[in-house]
Amino acid sequence: MRILTGIQPSGKLHIGNYFSVMRKMIEYQEKFDAFTFIANLHALTTFSSKEEQYQNTLDAVCDYLALGVDPEKNTFWLQSDVPIVTELSWYLSMSISVSSLSLAHSYKDKVAKGVSPNAGLYYYPILMAADILAFNTNKVPVGKDQKQHLEYTRDMAVRFNATYGETFIVPEPEIEENSAIIPGIDGQKMSKSYGNTITIFDDEKKIKKAVMSIVTDSAEIDVPKDPDSSVLFAIYSLFLGKEEVQKLKDRFATPGLRYGDVKKELFSAIMDYFSPYRTKRAELAQNKDYIKEVLRKGADKASQAASIQMEKVRRNMGIR
Ligand code: TRP
């Protein structure tokens, strides 16, 4: 069973990223044929500068390795290192209509915001389909926001198979429903674009500041608090086992709880949880040769897997 996902390198990694798809891919590498790549070609659709593009990509690689992506078990590469996928995206573009692409939320939202979109943004779902179909993928774990992109991918696979003969596995999405409910410090979904994140590898002061500014209601100390509507409770629960969650619930229900105290505890819990990863991350950042080697090997493995599939695609299209 091959499981594949791509992650856009978009700056500082936060706990919302970690507790959704990322942790899953790290668990899956133990059981499945895991493929994970950094989608730096997709990141070009929101390009700012080459320095930032490069740095974000490198940061994403270090983040993932530090948090436990094991390149021996998980084929791990940079999207741009396997250019054969862009060739496939061209072939796949024959299996989707312009009118259907125009309905993509990701594209429509940008247009609605007044952004004049480049063609790359429009083409985004096709490249993403190629990312998936080039590797004979069975399952794709993604966040809720990627649901439509997976539908496009499936549509293209089905249409291609109908036109050119059986070529692609039609992949199953595995939608991470949970990721939508990891709230940021203001209570909206945690997202870099809302500026409400708790980052993982920043310096302690920044992380503490974010934790201390988690929104709470104005309930007095001597009244019971409602855990179910509490952002603080939701975030803290991520770091707790079942029994500990229940204990925290009871503490909320008992008058006398101070939110400030709970925030301080949460901050310690976060630092404890990520401390080994932070150490590893700092070591990795010093070890450029190792990173280069990991990416080279990953690109080799990924290229090999894609080449087999591409032979079939070209043959079925009459290219060879
Ligand atoms: N579009 C995805 C995101 O922004 C990233 C991505 C690119 C991806 N290619 C993919 C995810 C292929 C899964 C499979 O999150």
Image: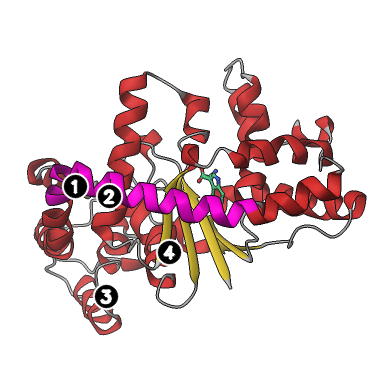
> Label 4 is placed on what type of residue?
Met
Q: Position of residue 221 (x, y in %)?
A: 13, 61
Marks 4/3: CA–CA distance: 30 Å
Earlier-in-chain disc, 2 versus 4: 4
Q: Residue at x 75, y 34 (%)?
A: 101
> Label 2 is placed on what type of residue?
Asp
Q: Position of residue 267 (x, y in %)?
A: 13, 57
Q: Which residue is mark 3?
A: 249
* Labels 3, 1: front one: 1
> Label 3 is placed on what type of residue?
Lys
Q: Residue at x 29, y 60 (%)?
A: 235
Classify mark 2: helix, strand or loop. helix
Q: Which mark is residue 63?
A: 2
Classify mark 1: helix, strand or loop. loop
CB contact under 8 Å: marks 1 and 2: yes
Label 1: few (<14), some (14–19) or many (≥20) C-alpha neighbours in 10 Å = many
Asked if residue 286 is among those painted magenta in the image, a careful observer would answer: yes
Marks 1/2: CA–CA distance: 8 Å
CB contact under 8 Å: marks 3 and 1: no
Q: Residue at x 52, y 35 (%)?
A: 42
* Labels 4, 3: front one: 4
Residue range in magenta is: 282-307
Classify mark 3: helix, strand or loop. helix
Marks 1/4: CA–CA distance: 19 Å
